[in-house]
Image (cartoon, rainbow, N blue to C red):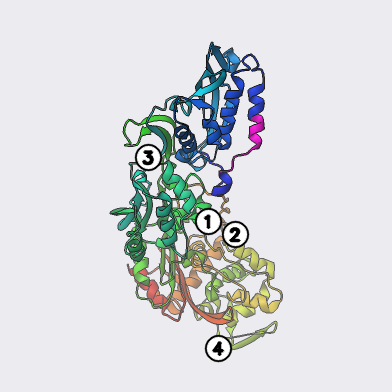
């Protein structure tokens, strides 16, 4: 159901008094045929609409006025309505049906009720009918619950029933669920059994501080409790165990709040930073997902679970019902059908995922890894270890160091007429544009040998063969800094335009302002392997709002030279320790730089083998080739 934007509880319950003028005008146009009954009808409806229930009850007969006052006053509460508008006449008034029909001292008046159900659904409009009697020369409304709704019987109340469909799963490339069942506590209330609903809900909101202080919206939650069927359990909060055991123990002592232990498929089986979690619909989370979700719902709170909330959860079927206080004899007055949930299928391969997780399992620093399929762009594995819940595999902003040399080498092969056998030098120190670059000096040899030996000075010197725009264009063609249309947050990298020759030389070796995520570098390796850069994707079925960039195919000779360079690095260079498969090509590097005034060390491995490209980044000095070997061996 289409919903409007969420308003503050106070604002959405304000009745526009200006509507009263329209109400009066509606009631006085063309109705003077029954002038004596009209004022009674008009005054009753206006008083009801503006919330002056005492005045409305004073214009009735046939029941205790306090009973009438209470019945009218509870309509908005029982529907958690944002507004209620009344007008004389119905949709059939143009067909010759009179608004007020008088027969002696008796009369019937037709009117229209339009109720804005706010977060519960679309406006509900229906015809109403009231009977009037002349008593002592004055017209009075003969009270009956059917004035509220023609199907409402004595002893019944209105209620809103929200029926949420079962949430659809997130699946892997084989169609198996990427979620697992976990223990949880479900808290809720039986609305009709609450001695003081306001007190119960206020205590619940006060005690509930979830994930950094997020709270439930007590006013909106109270509105939902009051509008729910009295004798039906209404879930208000689902908390994972043991994560929220302490909070669960505090909530168990709130009067009127009930709980039950459940097992629910709400935990990610792997790649939690990407798959995401489910949790309570706190006030700020509802600002993200919007209507029709409400306090008390369990919604996606991060990852794909949040980003695809509407697809995975669908929307509830909302009904307005009339029922007695026992919950029996329920009659459905109006329903709005919801939308069925739809599965989200990811490209994650559980075999690759297990291998990636195992490879990072014993790393003592924050570590992340991405594996992709070069021939398609599918993301096969996303692993984060010791990252504090951050998806650094997709979102990290790291200097890539010499792993960015894949981009630089591609530009040299394409634009500078070089190849892997071009003779180059590797001095111990070189100064370019005021910047000094150092490494272990090596004898003159081929570009492939110097690249394998991690010669920064070689690439720094060769920066003179390229202009800045050529380097930027090559990076862009390999997806760096582009919008991939991925559908989940990801850092695609950045290469600032060099201000001088020194900056350009630093960019050639992935330093200075150059930044990339493991995913961005995995896609560079994928292009070097397959000969075509393809945008990555991790969800097979949902459409994305951003248009993915087109595929790019560097010249075949460039790719052939890149493969030879990367294979040389795997057989005799920095990536040697990862060579457990014959076709491996890759590069490893340790880069140290300042971040926010503090030194930061990132150790990389970027490579490919057998239609799988991958990148590993570790925030500390480790042997990344050995991590890569574990992944490839797994």
Q: Residue at x 56, y 36 (%)?
A: 52
Give me the residue at 57% from left, 53% from top. Answer: 550
What residue lies at 40% left-to-right and 34% top-to-bottom?
157
Ranked by sequence position, the earlier of labels 2 and 4 is 4
Q: Nearer the viewer, mark 2 or mark 3?
A: 3
- Mark 4 lies on a secondary structure that is loop
Instruction: Between residue 485 and residue 207, name the one nearer to us.
Output: 207
Residue reaching furthest to the front: 136
Locate residue 464: give its quadrant: bottom right
CA distance separating discs 2 and 4: 36 Å
For marks 2 and 3, the one nearer the N-term is: 3
C-alpha distance separating marks 2 and 1: 10 Å
Instruction: Name the mark on residue 482.
Output: 2
Work out how far the residue at label 2 is from the one at label 3, CA to CA, in angstroms.
52 Å
The structure residue drawn at horizontal position 60% and vertical position 26%, both measured from the top left corner, is: 42
Residue pointed to by mark 4 = 441
Q: Position of residue 610 (x, y in %)?
A: 40, 62
**3 or 4: mark nearer the eye:** 3
Residue receiving disc 1 = 535
Residue 229's tag is 3
Circles 2 and 3 in contact, beta carbons < 8 Å: no
Please tell me whether residue 18 belongs to the stretch shown in magenta: yes
Q: Residues within 10 Å of mark 3 (few under 14, many from 20)?
A: many
Whichever of labels 2 and 1 marks the residue nearer the N terminus, that label is: 2
Where is 216 relative to 93, above or below? below
Asked if disc 2 and disc 1 are in contact, CB closer than 8 Å, the reply is: yes
């Amino acid at each position: 159901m289409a919903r409007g934007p969420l308003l503050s509880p106070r604002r959405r319950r304000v009745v526009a008094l200006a509507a009263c003028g329209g109400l009066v005008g509606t009631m006085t146009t063309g109705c003077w045929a029954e002038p004596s009954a009209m004022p009674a009808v008009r005054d009753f409806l206006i008083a009801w609409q503006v919330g002056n229930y005492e005045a409305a009850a004073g214009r009735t007969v046939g029941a205790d006025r306090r009973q009438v006052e209470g019945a009218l006053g509870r309509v908005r509460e029982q529907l958690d309505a944002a507004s209620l508008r009344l007008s004389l006449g119905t949709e059939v008034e143009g067909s010759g049906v009179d608004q007020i029909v008088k027969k002696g001292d008796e009369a019937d008046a037709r009117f229209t009720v339009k109720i804005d159900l706010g977060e519960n659904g679309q406006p509900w409009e229906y015809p109403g009918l009231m009977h009037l009697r002349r008593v002592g020369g004055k017209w009075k409304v003969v009270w009956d619950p059917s004035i509220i709704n023609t199907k409402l019987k004595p002893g019944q109340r209105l209620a809103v029933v929200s029926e949420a469909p079962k949430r659809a799963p997130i699946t892997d490339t084989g169609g198996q669920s990427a979620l697992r069942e976990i223990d949880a506590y479900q808290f809720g209330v039986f609305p009709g059994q609450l001695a003081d609903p306001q007190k119960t809900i206020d205590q619940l909101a006060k005690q509930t501080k979830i994930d950094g202080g997020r709270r439930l919206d007590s006013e909106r939650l109270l509105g939902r409790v009051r509008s729910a069927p009295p004798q039906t359990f209404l879930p208000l909060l689902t908390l994972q165990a043991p994560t929220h055991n302490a909070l669960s123990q505090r909530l168990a002592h709130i009067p009127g709040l009930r709980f039950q232990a459940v097992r629910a498929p709400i935990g990610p089986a792997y790649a939690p930073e990407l798959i995401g979690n489910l949790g309570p619909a706190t006030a700020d989370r509802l600002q993200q997902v919007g209507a029709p979700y409400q306090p008390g719902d369990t919604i996606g709170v991060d990852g794909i679970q949040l980003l695809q909330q509407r697809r995975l959860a669908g929307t509830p079927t909302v009904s307005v019902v009339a029922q007695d206080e026992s919950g029996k004899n329920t009659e459905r007055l109006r329903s709005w059908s919801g939308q069925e949930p739809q599965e989200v299928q990811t490209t994650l391969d559980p075999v690759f995922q297990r291998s990636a997780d195992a490879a990072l399992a014993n790393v003592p620093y924050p570590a992340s890894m991405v594996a992709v399929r070069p021939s398609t762009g599918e993301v096969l594995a996303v692993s984060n270890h010791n990252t504090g819940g951050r998806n650094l595999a997709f979102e990290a902003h790291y200097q890539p160091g010499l792993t960015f040399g894949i981009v630089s080498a591609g530009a040299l092969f394409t634009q500078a007429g070089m190849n892997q056998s071009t003779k180059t030098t590797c001095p111990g120190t070189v100064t370019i544009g005021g910047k000094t670059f150092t490494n272990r000096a090596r004898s003159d040899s081929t570009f492939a040998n110097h690249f394998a030996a991690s010669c920064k000075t070689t690439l720094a010197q060769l920066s003179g063969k390229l202009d800045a725009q050529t380097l930027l264009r090559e990076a862009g063609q390999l997806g760096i800094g582009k919008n991939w249309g991925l559908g989940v947050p990801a850092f695609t990298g950045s290469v600032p335009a060099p201000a001088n020759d020194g900056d350009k030389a630093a960019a050639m070796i992935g330093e200075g302002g150059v930044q990339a995520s493991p995913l961005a570098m995995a896609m560079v390796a994928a292009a070097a392997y397959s000969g075509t850069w393809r945008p990555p994707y991790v969800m097979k079925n949902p459409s994305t709002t951003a248009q993915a960039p087109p595929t790019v195919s560097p010249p075949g000779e460039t790719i052939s030279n890149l493969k030879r360079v990367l294979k040389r690095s795997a057989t005799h260079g920095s990536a040697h320790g990862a060579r457990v498969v014959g076709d491996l090509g890759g590069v490893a590097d340790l880069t140290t730089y300042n971040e926010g005034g503090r030194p930061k060390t990132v150790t990389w491995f970027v490579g490919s083998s057998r239609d799988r490209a991958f990148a590993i980044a570790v925030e500390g000095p480790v042997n990344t080739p050995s991590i890569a070997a574990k992944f490839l061996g797994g």
